[in-house]
Image (cartoon, rainbow, N blue to C red):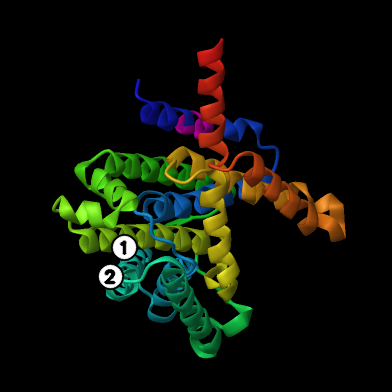
């Protein structure tokens, strides 16, 4: 069995088995948030890990994915599924509109441009008090399919788990397709990729839009699950959190970014006993991981395992 298939089977097995080890609603909530963060990171990994393009503003798409469907349902009484589709369309159109001018930049210039996009979206959400509730946030209606309301941790666990497995499967199939090989080529060298006839600008735009759609879908699911959303979800620190999850788990490793999302979502919960020193301990753990596992957790451990097997 190919390694990508093993990873997907392992993820599906964990999703199926995990509920039997979750003791209460809080544990379910943390598991759901891990899945939603992981969904964002799977998409962001296509952009950062495979296409080699940094984004420090992806929380903007996460926030828009949360707010647009919520507003359409609340203000215009749209059907939840139609509002979700409209929200994803809005995220995709914004990503497509800004991708070409932004992705002409490289390095820290690209990072600053995506950061600026995130800041603009966060400011708009904060300032539109009548629409979004401003800094206080807004309530979000439960997702409805006909007369059925999707509510409760058990329901949202299976929705999130199924969506994550599907998202990982789609990402892995994209990576192994000719488009995925083109992304890896331009990551290695854009000049060399272009000399081989690869449409560098076109593939970068596609990777940007797809990663934005992943973030928008996760944002919408988060809003409907929590039934509340605030501008923090579109803020700069949220974007940094997503990038850190990708780097921590291992760039260009789909399973790795899922592990990175799980670790960075779980650690703050596990370190609450340190009180005022929580962030200090968290920072020290992250620094240690990156010093001793520089390629990310999963790729580094996989390399150590391969080396150990070769020597034994």
- Residue nearest the viewer, comparing 285 with 261: 285
Majority secondary structure of the magenta segment?
helix
Residue that extends furthest to the top in the rendered view of this protein: 312
Please, what secondary structure does the residue beneath circle 1 have? helix
Q: Is residue 300 above or below residue 230?
A: above
Q: Which residues are magenta?
A: 11-16
Residue 229 visible here: no
Residue 124 visible here: yes
Q: Where is residue 94 drawn, in percent x and y?
A: 32, 74
Q: Is residue 12 magenta?
A: yes
> Which residue is identified by label 1?
209
The residue lying at 41 percent from left, 70 percent from top is 110
* Disc on res. 296: none
Q: Where is residue 36 drawn, in percent x and y?
A: 51, 52
* Disc on res. 96: 2
Real-space CA distance between mark 2 and mark 1, rounded to the nearest whole angstrom: 6 Å
Q: Is residue 207 magenta?
A: no
Q: Earlier in the sequence, mark 2 or mark 1?
A: 2
Please, what secondary structure does the residue beneath circle 2 have? helix
Q: Are marks 2 and 1 in contact (CB under 8 Å)?
A: yes
The residue lying at 84 percent from left, 57 percent from top is 277
> The N terminus lies in which quarter of the figure?
top left
Q: Where is residue 239 drawn, in percent x and y?
A: 53, 65
The residue lying at 36 percent from left, 49 percent from top is 50
């Amino acid at each position: 069995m190919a390694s990508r298939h093993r990873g997907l089977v392992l993820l599906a097995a964990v999703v199926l088995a995990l509920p039997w080890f979750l003791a209460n609603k809080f544990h379910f909530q943390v598991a759901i948030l891990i899945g939603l963060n992981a969904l964002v990171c799977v998409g962001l990994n296509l952009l950062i890990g495979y296409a080699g393009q940094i984004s420090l503003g992806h929380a903007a798409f996460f926030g828009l994915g949360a707010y647009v469907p919520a507003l359409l349902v609340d203000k215009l009484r749209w059907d939840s599924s139609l509002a979700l589709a409209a929200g994803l369309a809005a995220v995709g159109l914004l990503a497509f509109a800004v991708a070409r001018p932004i992705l002409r930049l490289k390095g820290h210039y690209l990072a600053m441009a995506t950061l600026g996009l995130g800041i603009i979206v966060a400011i708009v959400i904060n300032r539109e008090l009548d629409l979004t509730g401003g800094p206080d946030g807004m309530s979000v209606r439960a997702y409805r399919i006909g007369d059925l309301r999707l509510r409760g941790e058990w329901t949202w666990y299976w929705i999130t788990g199924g969506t994550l497995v599907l998202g990982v499967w789609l990402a892995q199939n994209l990576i192994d397709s000719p488009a995925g090989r083109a992304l890896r080529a331009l990551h290695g060298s854009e000049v060399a990729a272009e000399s081989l006839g690869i449409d560098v600008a076109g593939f970068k735009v596609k990777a940007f839009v797809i990663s934005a759609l992943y973030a928008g879908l996760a944002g919408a699911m988060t809003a409907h699950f929590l039934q509340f959303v605030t501008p923090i979800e579109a803020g700069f620190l949220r974007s940094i959190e997503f990038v850190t999850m990708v780097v921590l788990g291992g760039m260009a490793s789909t399973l790795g970014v899922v592990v990175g999302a799980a670790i960075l979502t779980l650690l703050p919960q596990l370190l609450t006993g340190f009180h005022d020193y929580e962030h200090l301990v968290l920072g020290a753990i992250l620094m240690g991981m990156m010093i001793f596992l520089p390629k990310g957790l999963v790729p580094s451990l996989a390399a150590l395992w391969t080396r150990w097997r070769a020597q034994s």
